[in-house]
Every structure is written in structure tokens, then in C-alpha cells.
Amino acid sequence: MCAADFTQGAAGSAPDVDFEARVLVCPAYGSKESRSHWHDTLEREVPFTEEALIKHLAPRQLEQLSRFHPAGAARFWGATSTHDKAMSNVRTGDVALFTGANKLLAVGEVGVIFVNREVADTLWPPSPGGKSWHTVYSLRDFVPAEVPYEELAALVGYSKNYKFYSQLVLKGDKARAVIDGLRITTRTVLEQLGIEEPPARDPLPVQRAELEQQHTPVVSFERAMAATLYRREEQPLVMEFCATLAVAAERFRSPVGFCDIYLQGPDSVEVIEAKSRTEHAYVREALSQLLDYAPHSPRPVDRLAVLLPDAPDERELQLLHRYGVDCIHRVSPGVFRRVPAPDDRRHLMKRLWTEG
């Protein structure tokens, strides 16, 4: 069970995914050492095909890295032997939260994980008397975030003063609460649902090369916005809005993606898509996503709405109302206004929303 696992077996939903992600909470910007590691292997991708690393990688490790990171470079993080027991169960698709400076700084998705002291010590040379970060893992995705500890602690169920000083591996309800609360969508789950293509089983072979032969810049592979691990700009707006609701905000997964907000009341069902800006292109994208998600709703949809940080221009409002879609926009902190579509238009469009 991962983010949005509220609708297993529901009509119109995607096939169940046999995957329950853990959440690693990784203090990453406290000590001088960890800040140095952050700058070296999280702020930038590290080429693993250069001689300094490739000579220490076992064939299987190199094959896996090449499969998940076909550009030949990745971001890396690690753990010392103190965490061996917890890390032994970590796998591809688990979520990594990087913390420091009293907030969640970034969200990542675990890629390839292995124990290799030589690789670790090349990436992060131990200080005199220090421990090797011998458990190494790459990151399939890495997205900056800015969530105060107080909000993160509330999701986990900890005291609001909890400081996340040490590494944690959360599972079960605690992991689900974080994944759902932050609206995290991992690439691994999207691949299992068939929404994204999984990495090739037989990647092109990687050749050893001396440092002076490496003249080609590293290529970054960008993902479509609809499949972003963590939508940094929309997330604060979604969390602020959900805090005003009388019912629990959920999500549902479908063959076309994950909705932002799914509300099931006793008498109605609503799907809401959030955007960080009010320009026409953003409103149009939200509208197309809602029309794509609606036929896959576990229960027939009664309302569709777009959530925005400010009131849109009249042109954008008319576009939404033409298709029977409401607009919800932020008025002030914790205060939102709904501008409903005309009832006759919404009733006219409802049949089209729900036809699959």
C-alpha cells in the first residue's frame, strides 16, 4: 500500500499494487560532515562510470545503477553500520526524507541500494576515527521541499517539538501517514500501475573510462509534471486547504495518475486538482487532469474543482464553469472561497465526467 491506497478493489480503480513503502528520515544538514556530504552527493549527480567509483562496483551493482540511472550519474546517500538492521529491509521505491535546519529539506525516492565500503569511502571519505557510510543508495528522484518540523512531526504522530535528530525508518501506518500527508507519488508505484515505463531490463553496457576521457556532460532525465514525486509548489496550498475540511482528504490512484484530493461525504463525492499559479495554462492543465481522473473515481463524482492560490481572472473562471467545474481559491491564510459553477452546467456535464 502506498500513497492513495484508499480504494483497493473499487470499481474503475487501477489494479492493486503489492508494495508498501517505508519512509527513511535522514538527518542530512546538521553536522559539518553531513553538510559536506549533502553538497558532494545530493546537490549534484555523481558520475558512477568514472574510474574512481567504477573500479569498486561489483558487476551486479553497476548493472543496477546503469538500469535505474541510464545517464551514468546519480545522487547518493548512505548509512553507517549503526543502522544496518533497519537498512537491510530498505528497497527500491521507498521514500527518503532529508531533514535539517528545523525542516524537511528534500524528498527522494530510493533507487539502487547496496553495501559497499569502498564505494562509500570514495563518495564520503570518513573523518579520522569516523565510521564508513557503507550502506549506499542512489536516488531515483530528489525534489527540494520546505516543510517545518512541526508539520512533519504531526504527520508521524510525534510531539510538535520533535527535532528529528537521528535516522528513522518508518513503516506501516506511520509511513502511510507521511506519504499520504505530503502527497508523495513514487515512480515505482507509477511503474507498477503501468502509468510510467519501468527502467529497461537490459541497459546499454557501461564501459570503463579514465577520468581524462570523460568529456561528455552528464545528461539529466526530466519527468513529466504529472508524475512528480513531490510537488513542492502545490503541496503547502493542498495542506492548508485540507486543514479546513470537516472530512478526511484522500487520494485515489487510476490508470491515468493520482488525483490531488478526493473527498467522500455522506451525500457527495468531489475530486479537486491543485495548481500553484492562476495563469491560463495552469488552469487548463488542471481542467484536463480532472476530466481525465473523473471517470476512474471509485464512486461517481458529484463535483469537480480546481484549487488555486489566488482568485483567477474572469477568462479562467469562465473556462472552468463552462465544463461545470468549481473554482476554490485562497483568500487569506486558512481561508478559502468556492466559486461554484452554475448548477445547470454542472448537471449537464456530470454524465460526461463519469462516463468511462
Image: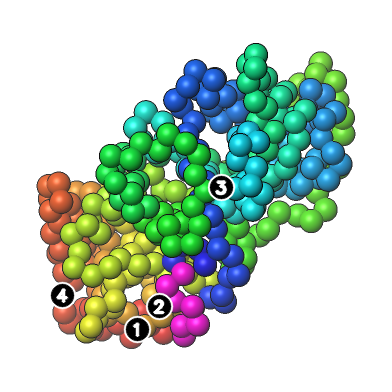
Task: Out of 121 and 337, give the one closest to the viewer.
Answer: 121
285 displayed left or right of 326: right
Can residue 21 be spotted in the picture? yes
User: Which residue is label 4 attached to?
Assistant: 342
Tell me the residue at 50%/82% (across/down): 9
Choose mark 1 or mark 4, whichever is in front.
1
> For residue 109, which numbered disc appears in the image?
3
> Does the CB distance between marks 4 and 2 fall below 8 Å?
no
Task: Out of 96 and 131, give the one closest to the viewer.
Answer: 131
Choose mark 3 or mark 4, whichever is in front.
3
Tell me the residue at 29%/76% (across/down): 264
Q: CA distance from mark 3 to mark 4?
A: 42 Å
User: Which residue is label 2 attached to?
Assistant: 297
Q: Which is more N-terminal, label 2 or label 4? A: 2
Q: Is residue 168 magenta?
A: no
Can residue 183 be spotted in the picture? no
Q: CA distance from mark 1 to mark 4?
A: 19 Å
SS of the residue under disc 2: loop
